[in-house]
Image (cartoon, coloured by chain):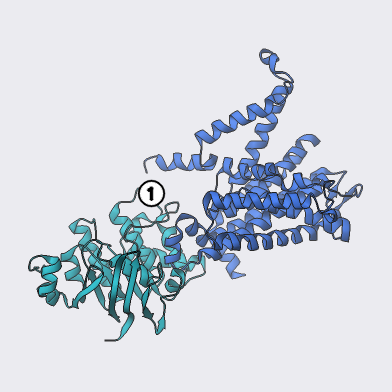
Amino acid sequence: MSKIRKLAQASSRDLMVLAIVVTILALVPFGVSRFTLSVAIAALIFALAGIGWNVLSGFAGQFSFGHAAYFGLGAYTVAVTLTKYSISPWLGLILGGLVAAVFGLLTGWISFRFGLKGAYFALATFALAEMLRLTFNTVDFVGAGIGITIPLAGGDDWARIQFEDTPSLQYWVILGLVALSTLAVIGVMKSRIGSMMLAVREDEDAASALGINPLRAKLIAIAISGFITALAGGFYTQSLLFINSDLAFGPLVSVLILLRPIIGGVGTIWGPVLGAGILSVLGEATRSLVRQPPSFLQIIEGVNGLDQVLFGLILVVVIIRAPDGVLGWFRRRRQSRPA
Amino acid sequence: MNPVLSVRSVTKRFGGLTAVNGVSLDLGEGEILGIIGPNGAGKTTLFNVISGAIPPDQGEVVYGGDRIDRLAPYEIASRGLVRTFQVAKPFTGLTVLENVMVGAFLRRPEHDEAKVHARAMLERTGLDALADRPVKGLTLSARKRLELARALATDPTVLLLDEVLAGLTPTEGAEMVKVVRAIRDGGVSLLVIEHVMAAIMALSDRVAVIHHGELLAIGPPAQIAKDPTVVAAYLGEEFQIAPD
């Protein structure tokens, strides 16, 4: 307990920010429509997946282009354990996290052992996610090409994490998962393990010369990372009540996951959540602009796919202006000021 | 003399080039042993072999009673034999304090303890005022001291310093010599590669001269400076030891 208390003192500022952010986000359901709430839920799901990605790729510096692997393993574990063995999705979430962590340890051990770095490691993660996608698309036990449909519980059912009548509850559950994961990441990054990850990211030889086993640091990172991203995948199944191999393991999923922390700030505690917020607002704004443009832009009304193009263009501008994310941009501005 | 570290007939070849050829030397407890030699003499290769970065082709390295020449660098470092790099390798994304904490965490798993220890190391190396600065923008002198502070934070028994004086101004160099002496007085044995002749002669208890990968001579600075083979091969003229 005293260890936890000490850690809490060391990261008091992060914890205060966490309390404030969670309190504000917890109030969102009181002021928005059911549609907006569903957008917010989706944003939090990918924020959570991004928090996981950020541990391996942001803090430990091993860029993953295949986090759909963990997301999908989480999603399918919940779906399979619920529909085949009637296991509560709460337990399914944990099991999915463990399955993903073990998958990360095994594949990470092979990749890192053989010295895969940078683009080569990224490609390996991409290939692994594709491999899982194709496997789950063929194996009958997991629904093959059809996927798995989660039966409706009807009404609000805490045991099955389905809230037909009160979607706010679903929002608060995913917000809780985001808060817990952020708390865990804050704790890890203030600990020896976090310091090991950062050192390995910055310079493996120098880290090794200070007694750090780089392989061990990377494996711890990949296990934590996979676990958190799998939680997001498991919750995704519960919010969609359906999963198939493209939704779980598709390349687009990997991109959606890594985009959040990259926009918000890679290797920062709040990057994934901030990035998820920015991207949702941006996505909804461009969509509604194309749906109901102001009178002088009447010409773009209802043009198919134009919102996506606008979204993409704005993204490009953001990435050019702030290559290290919005938080990185703020930090640079603060540092460039004379002290 | 009680050796804490023994290098025994170590040879390392890179293709046709023999970078280190049958070098043997002992580092005594609490000793500062300087290693000098011209560029390409094999000094850094010898360091790389001792610290586990590359395995020797022949010979062995014994530390704390065990052979360590097949261990990984992090295993050797966790046993208390820690090196610095000739070209400083700071963790550029972290602050000065965070850099040193990476070292401090090796023996102190608790965040607070590691932080207190890291601050103490910054004080010893005169970096305390820069603790919360990012590494980017540090002067060369500060980078060298950071390299030292980080290694020191691991509580080493033996410290290998690779050119911590190179590129420093005379004043900065004199400061560094004081710091290194103080480290030895704290009970650490040091193996020091150096280019700056006056400094190494003044700093070391003994000096080893390496030339073309071979150990040419080893002994007290005064004796080395007069050694005719050393003078002929390396120093070029009789070397005057700078007065303390």
Number of residues whose C-alpha sits closer than 10 Å to that of mark 1, classed few (under 14), some (14–19) or many (20 or more): some
Which residue ends up furthest to the front in the rendered image? B16
Helix, strand or loop under label 1: loop
Q: Colour of chain B?
A: cyan
Given residues B165 and B13, the one toward you in this image is B13
Vertically, is A290 above or below A131?
above
Report whether A19 appears left or right of A117: right
Q: Looking at the picture, how far across and down is residue A160, in whole percent?
A: 85, 54
- Please indicate, yes or no, whether residue A159 appears anywhere in the rendered image: no
Query: If the image is split into quadrants, where does the C terminus of chain B sit?
Result: bottom left
Given residues A301 and A66, the one toward you in this image is A66
At 70% from the left edge and 41% from the top edge, which residue is drawn? Answer: A43
Question: Mark 1: which amino acid?
Answer: Lys
Locate residue B41: give its quadrant.
bottom left
At 72% from the left edge and 53% from the top edge, which residue is drawn? Answer: A132
Given residues B130 and A305, the one toward you in this image is A305
Report whether A72 appears left or right of A261: right
Q: Which chain is blue?
A: A
Numbered-mark total:
1
Q: Looking at the picture, how far across and down is residue A321, in whole percent?
A: 50, 33
Report whether B114 appears left or right of A257: left
Question: Which residue is tagged 1?
Answer: B136
Query: If the image is split into quadrants, where does the N terminus of chain B sit?
Result: bottom left
